[in-house]
Image: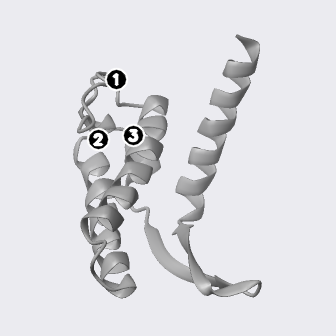
């Protein structure tokens, strides 16, 4: 993947299928959310959240459309919401409510990556 190109997306990578798709999706998900909050920085928090949610929905649909890993992505969802911490109620925190199946696959993929890194 061309890391010099900041606009490169995981779903465009030729190896974005099967187990690899979960890693690419995790990268794209973080990038998508960050990008939307940057694009709408002058908007209200509600608008930022709404636009980020639409982008996350599009991203998930993109992974379904390219059939990156049908059992992992089809019928799954990620809902963004703001949660308030009792310690700092004036600063909401973005929370991702991921469907249990997709969340377990992403966590397993991340654990597998961590394990392979520690071996090398």
- 15 or 39: nearer the viewer: 39
Q: Nearer the viewer, mark 2 or mark 1?
A: 1
Where is residue 72 drawn, in percent x and y? 46, 47
Q: Is residue 25 left or right of residue 103?
A: left
Is 29 situated left or right of 82 in this image?
A: left
Q: Assess disc 1: are there few (<14), some (14-19) or many (≥20) residues with their C-alpha within 10 Å of its C-alpha.
A: some
Residue at figure coordinates x 63%, y 51% from the top left: 104
Q: Nearer the viewer, residue 58 or 88?
A: 88
Furthest residue in direction front, as rendered:
42
Seen as rendered, the residue at the extreme top is 120
Q: Quadrant of the C terminus?
A: top right
Residue plotted at (28% across, 28% down): 13
Q: Quadrant of residue 35?
A: bottom left
For marks 1 and 3 on the same chain, the one whose residue lies earlier in the sequence: 1
Q: CA distance from mark 2 to mark 3?
A: 5 Å
Asked if the residues shown at circle 2 and circle 3 are in contact, with their CB atoms under 8 angstroms apart, the answer is yes
The answer to which of marks 2 and 1 sits earlier in the sequence is 1
Which residue is the site of mark 1?
15
Residue 89 pos. (x, y %): 66, 89
Marks 1/3 in contact by CB < 8 Å: the verdict is no
Q: Which residue is mark 3?
A: 69
Mark 1, secondary structure of its residue: loop
- Residue at 57 percent across and 46 percent down: it is 106
Where residue 56 sits, quadrant-wise, is: bottom left
Structural crowding at the residue carrying mark 2, measured as other residues with C-alpha within 10 Å and reported as few (<14), some (14–19) or many (≥20) = some
| Residue 56 higher or lower than 87, as above or below | above
């Amino acid at each position: 993947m061309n890391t010099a190109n900041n606009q490169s997306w995981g779903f465009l990578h030729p190896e974005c299928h099967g187990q690899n798709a979960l890693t690419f999706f995790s990268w794209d998900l973080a990038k998508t959310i960050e990008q939307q909050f940057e694009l709408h920085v002058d908007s209200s928090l509600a608008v930022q959240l709404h636009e980020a949610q639409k982008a996350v929905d599009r991203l998930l649909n993109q992974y379904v459309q390219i059939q990156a890993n049908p059992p992992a992505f089809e019928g799954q969802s990620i809902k963004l919401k703001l949660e308030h911490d009792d310690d700092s109620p004036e600063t909401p925190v973005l929370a991702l409510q991921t469907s249990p199946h997709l969340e377990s696959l992403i966590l397993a993929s991340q654990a597998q990556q961590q394990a392979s890194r520690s071996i090398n």
